[in-house]
Amino acid sequence: MGIGYLKDIGYRDTLDRLIVAFCKDYFFRKAVIESGESSKRTRMEYEYINGIIADAASEIVGGDFEIYINEIGEMRGYAGSDAYGISESRYKQLKKEVKINIAKKLHLLD
């Protein structure tokens, strides 16, 4: 079964929605971690998930990784982007690569 099969059954749409949700909650988890107002176990889980997402995004875009995490989570496009100085096609390519890398690091995609 190839990637076409996954697209036929709607897996790619579901995967995209999962990555958007993980990115949307990234800053909530970050605030909880920084506030210290959670159990040790919750804080550890949040640190683990956010660490994976941050590492995956920074591997692709470097220091601006939180911009891309936010824009994926908010489903923001190039016109409203905080990523300056790159073409629209490059922006879209980077955003797609970040999503794929996050999915791979979370073991949601091979």
Image (tube, grey):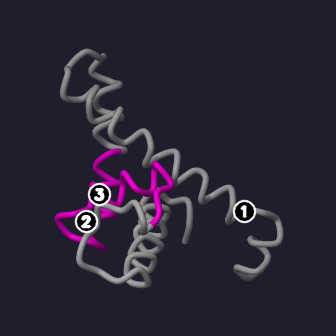
CA neighbours of label 3 inside 10 A, class few (<14), some (14 to 19), many (20+): some
Nearest to N terminus: mark 2 or mark 1: 1
CA neighbours of label 1 inside 10 A, class few (<14), some (14 to 19), many (20+): some
Above-or-below relation of 31 to 72: above
Residue beneath disc 3: 67
Residue beneath disc 2: 58
Q: How much space separates mark 3 and mark 1, taking CA atoms?
A: 26 Å
On the picture, is 83 further left or further right than 5? left
Instruction: Tell me which residue sits at (72%, 62%) in the image.
Output: 11
Please tell me in which quadrant of the rendered image residue 50 appears.
top left
Helix, strand or loop at label 1? It is: helix
Instruction: Tell me which residue sits at (24%, 29%) in the image.
Output: 33
Residue beneath disc 1: 11
- Viewer-nearest residue: 69 or 52: 69
Q: Mark 2 or 3, which is nearer the eye?
A: 3
Residue 96, label in figure: none
Instruction: Tell me which residue sits at (28%, 67%) in the image.
Output: 83
Nearest to N terminus: mark 2 or mark 3: 2
Q: How much space separates mark 2 and mark 3, taking CA atoms?
A: 10 Å
Above-or-below relation of 37 to 3: above
Amino acid under disc 1: Tyr
- Which of the image's four quarters has the C terminus? bottom right
Q: How much space separates mark 2 and mark 1, taking CA atoms?
A: 25 Å
Amino acid under disc 2: Ser
Amino acid under disc 3: Ile
Magenta stretch contains residue 55: yes
Helix, strand or loop at label 3? It is: helix
Residue 60 place in picture, x, y as percent = 30, 74
On the picture, is 61 further left or further right than 79? left
